[in-house]
Image (cartoon, helix red, strand yellow):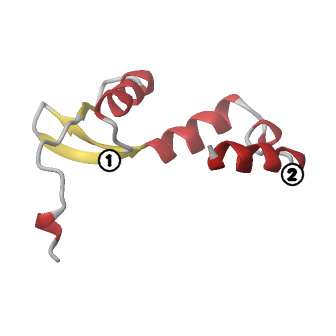
Amino acid sequence: MKVKEVMTRDVKACALTESLADAAKAMWDYDCGILPVVKDGKTVVGLITDRDMHGRGNKRAHSIEHLTRRSDDWPSLFDHARG
């Protein structure tokens, strides 16, 4: 199988000047976890991922304690995953 057989062709992007909130909304709206970042509406200058937002955005706003789950929360996570 080749990349071209599974790649997304209708690519959405965000502008270099957009806020993280706008990029997060676009990811939600388009059900994706990554967006190319474009300059002048056409030149790709980078990528933004949901992981970038979570990792970098939250670290500035919260201490590490707010980013981790306590081990006693794990059963509820597993119950939720089972449906």
Image position, residue 25 (x, y; %) = 38, 24
Residue 82 at x, y percent in the picture: 64, 49
Q: Specify the quadrant that holds the C terminus.
A: top right
Percent x, y for residue 4? 11, 65
* Residue nearest the observer in this picture, 44 or 81: 81
Question: How would you rate the neighbour count of disc 1 (Cα within 10 Å): few for under 14, some for 14-19, many for 20 or more?
Answer: some
Residue 80 as seen in the image, left or right of residue 71? left
In front: 33, or 46?
A: 33
Give the residue at x 81% y 49%: 75
- Occupied quadrant, residue 24: top left
The reply to whether the C-beta atoms of the residues labelled 1 and 2 are less than 8 Å apart is no
Q: In this figure, what is the number of numbered marks?
A: 2
Marks 1 and 2 sit apart, C-alpha to C-alpha, by 33 Å
Q: What amino acid is at disc 2?
A: Ser
Percent position (x, y) of residue 72?
Answer: 89, 47
Secondary structure under the numbered disc 2 in the rendered image = helix
User: Circle 1 sits on which residue?
Assistant: 47
Residue situated in front as seen by the camera: 38 or 26: 26
Instruction: Give the residue displayed 86% in from the left and 46% down from the top.
Output: 70
The residue most toward the bottom is: 1
At horizontal 10% and vertical 38% (from top left) the residue drawn is 42
Amino acid type of the residue that numbered disc 1 sits on in the rendered structure: Leu
Q: Earlier in the sequence, mark 1 or mark 2?
A: 1
Q: Name the residue under label 2.
A: 71
